Amino acid sequence: MSSLASVTQWHHEVDVLICGFGMAGSSAAIDAIDADPGAKVLIIEKMSERYAGGNARASGQSLMINKNPEALKEYQRAMSAPNPIPEDMLDIWATRMSQLEPWIQARAEEVGAKFIKGTGFSEREAVLEFPEFGAREAVAYTSTILPIPAGVWLAFKANVDKRPVQVMYETPLVDLIQDPDTLEVFGAVVEQNGQRVNIKARRGVIIAVGGYENNLDMQRNYCGYQDIHPLGTPGNTGDGIKILQRPVPSSGICAIAASPAASGRASCIPM
Ligand SMILES: Cc1cc2nc3c(=O)[nH]c(=O)nc-3n(C[C@H](O)[C@H](O)[C@H](O)COP(=O)(O)OP(=O)(O)OC[C@H]3O[C@@H](n4cnc5c(N)ncnc54)[C@H](O)[C@@H]3O)c2cc1C
C-alpha cells in the first residue's frame, strides 16, 4: 500500500471510487449514485471500453433467483465448507439475494430491455449448478435479460451510462493509499498512459476487479493448475488480491536509537 504521507498531489477527488467495470462495479455505481444523486462517482477500468464488462460480458447471463434465504445459506455453506464464510456475512448476503429480483427487473425496464424467466437459450427453467450441495432448494428459477448474448451486462452498462457516473477506461488500479496508523483508505493510485495518478475518495473505495483466472502463478499457487485456458476476460489477473496482500505502509515516524557501539550516531527505524 502507498502511505498517505507520500501523496504530494491529488489529481482527482471524488466521493466514491469504484475499481473495475463488471457486474459488481456497475451494480455498485448504480446503487451509489441512486442513494445520493449529488455524489461524485467514478469507475476506473483496466480494459478499453470495447473490452470492459469483465466476465459479465462473456458469461451465460443466467441469474439465479432465490426466494428462500435459509436454503441459499445451506447451499453456500456446503460449497464453501473448506473456507467457511462468517455467518453474519452469509446472513446479510442471503437476505439481500432473496430480495434482488425486482431491482434487477427495474434495471432492465429502465433501459427498455426485456427481463425474462428462463435462460433465453435453452428450455431449462433453472440452471442448477452443484445440485448435490442444495441448488435444487436454493434456486427458485433462472432469469435473464435479453438480448442473448450479454443482455444482462448491456442493460447494466446502459444503466451506468445514463447516470452521471464518470468512467475512465484503460486506467488500472495499481495501489491503495492508506493511513498507516488508522489503516483508513483515503484513495487509490491508478495508471494512465504510463503515469501514476492519485485519486482521493472522500467516502470510499470499492474494489470490484474480479478474480485471478488469467494469472498462471496464482492459479498454480491457489488451485494447483499447471496450465490454464480461461474463457473470461484477460483483464482479471488477481490485481485486487495482490494489492490487499501488500503490507501496511510505514508511517514514516522514526525512532531515534543509539547505535549499539554507542558512537552517538542515530539510526532511523521506520515504524
Ligand atoms: C464463461 C463464463 C460463463 C459464466 N456464466 C455465468 C452465468 O450464467 N451466471 C452467473 O451468475 N455467473 C456466470 N459466470 C460468472 C460471472 O460472470 C462472474 O461471477 C461475474 O462476472 C463477476 O463479476 P465481477 O464484477 O466480480 O467481475 P468481472 O465481471 O470479471 O469484472 C471485473 C472487472 O475488473 C476489471 N479489472 C481487473 N483488474 C483491474 C484493475 N487493476 N483496475 C481496474 N479494473 C480492473 C476487469 O477488466 C473487469 O472489467 C460466468 C463466468 C464465465 C467466465
Image: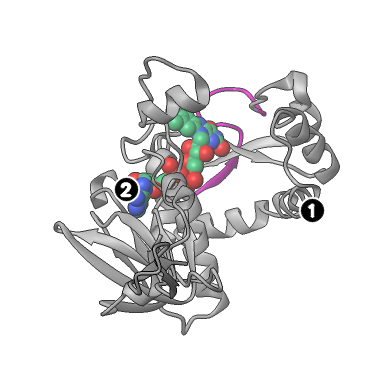
Identity, as a three-letter code, of the amino acid under mark 2: Ala
Residue 79 percent across, percent down from the top left: 71, 29
SS assignment for the magenta stretch, majority: loop
Residue 26 locus on image (x, y percent) = 45, 57
**Residue at mark 2:** 52
In the rendered image, residue 56, in percent from the top left (x then y), is placed at 44, 41
Residue situated in front as seen by the camera: 32 or 18: 18
Is 17 displayed left or right of 50 in the figure?
A: right
At x 34%, y 70%, the residue is 263
The one nearer the camera, 158 or 120, is 158
Image color mode:
one colour
Q: Which residue is mark 1?
A: 88
Q: Nearer the viewer, residue 32 or 85?
A: 85
Asked which secondary structure carries label 2, the reply is loop
Rendered residue at 32%/41% (across/down): 235
In this picture, residue 45 sits left or right of residue 138? left
Q: Quadrant of ligand 1?
A: top left
Mark yes or no: residue 162 visible. no
Residue situated furthest bottom in the rendering:
38
Mark 2 residue CB less than 8 A from any atom of ligand 1: yes
Nearest to N terminus: mark 1 or mark 2 = 2
**Residue type beneath disc 1:** Asp
Quadrant in which the N terminus appears = bottom left
With respect to residue 125, does 61 lie above or below? below
Q: Residue at x 23, y 54 (%)?
A: 170
* In the depicted structure, whether residue 236 falls above or below residue 105: above
Q: Along the horizontal axis of the image, is 71 left or right of 97?
A: right
Extent of the magenta region? 113-126
Give the structural element (helix, strand or loop) at label 1: helix
In the rendered image, the vertical position of residue 183 relative to residue 212, given as above or below: below
